[in-house]
Image (tube, rainbow, N blue to C red):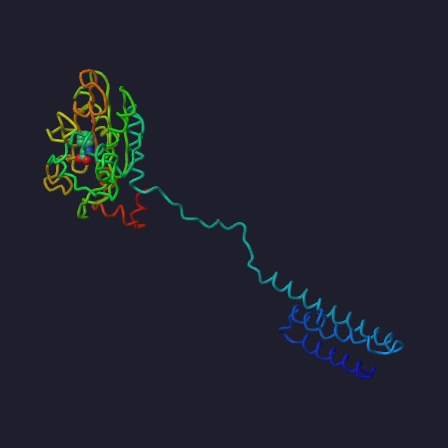
Amino acid sequence: MTPEEWKGKLSAIKDSFSSLISEKKADYEALYQRFLGRKGELSLLLRDLKDITAEERKNLGMLGNAAKQELLSAAEKIKAAAAAHSAKAAPQIDITLPGINFPKGSLHPLTQTMDRISAAFLKLGFSLEDGPLVEDDWHCFEALNFPECHPARDMQDTFYVNAKDEKGKDKLLRTQTSTVQIRVMEKQNPPLRVFHPGRVFRNEAVDASHAFAFHQVEGLYVDKGVTMADLKWTVDAFMKDLFGSSVRTRFNPSYFPFVEPGAEVDMSCVFCKGQAEHCPVCKGTGWLELLGSGMVHPNVLRACGHDPEIWSGFAFGCGIERFAMLLYGISDMRMFFENDFRLLEQVR
Ligand code: PHE
């Protein structure tokens, strides 16, 4: 390349640079890459100086370096202008404005109900126990005095699991929390006072008051000389804690294989207080059936290795959904499992 050609190229580069930089959208990065970067037009031209004679090179080198400085400072000006512009365009933060509220979650109504029930039990001196959801026949039925083929088993339509227990019987999803009575009495000696809230499963058709998976809570008290009067007092105190001191309870004879005698417990209607003939909740009877209860059957104590001549006890159990429906005025059990925010937001 002759020195003249070199100079021509330099001035062409300067021309195209200045026409680009005067454009409105001139961008520092793009300009820099195109002219001044490692493979930029000016950088390559300066590298071409090596092909030019030594005496010319000095002169052209000075011209080239001066041009480089010129382009660089023009490009930097653009960069500074762009930075100033974007600072102005950035959102202005008004630190005096109130902050943004983050939506706060809450416990599910059933969890809240279980917590209330647990608190009531704890106040009465009962302690929390746990048990498995997949059970064996012994803990769900046999030890609870439901012998094989006993018709009482038909009251609890059961989901069996494709696995055998130690005795070669099909395992099952527990149908009641009464299983925990057995689990506790097998590992602990009386006196004992325990409760267990948890999930149970029955092959039920789903409707407003039935679900195939629901929750129960179980209370068990075993000591020397425990009587039906203790059961009545305890259940009454438990219900008053949950629904208020004006609530009354009533016991009706009933049958559960693992208690003798057995009773269903009704609570006076918390909605109409027995005053409304057409109360939709108690159907005008003034009473709501809420619990199963009774004195622990001697066969159950024996099955767990305790002598019924020495020990006696009571047990009671109930559905937690039913409690929650009464506590929060919810009319359809399915609402608990639909995860509709409108319900969850109301029950906080
Ligand atoms: N387990 C019984 C049921 O599911 C309820 C119950 C519990 C009855 C404890 C008596 C004593 O129907």
What is the x, y in percent for residue 344? 31, 46
Image height check: is 257 above or below 347? above
Image height check: is 38 above or below 318? below
Residue 210 can be seen, yes or no: yes
What is the x, y in percent for residue 191? 27, 19
Residue 5 or residue 248, whichever sits in front: 5
Q: Residue at x 17, y 48 (%)?
A: 205
Residue extending furthest right?
A: 55
Q: Residue at x 31, y 39 (%)?
A: 111
Image height check: is 190 above or below 27? above
Choose top left, top right, bottom left or bottom right for residue 91: bottom right
Indicate left or right for 321 with 260 as reference: right
Residue 42 or residue 303, whichever sits in front: 303
Indicate left or right for 298 with 346 as reference: left
Residue 250 or residue 276, whichever sits in front: 250
Please state the quadrant of the image where ligand 1 appears. Answer: top left
Indicate left or right for 28 with 296 as reference: right
What is the x, y in percent for residue 137? 21, 35
- Which quarter of the image is occupied by the C terminus? top left
Residue 290 can be seen, yes or no: no
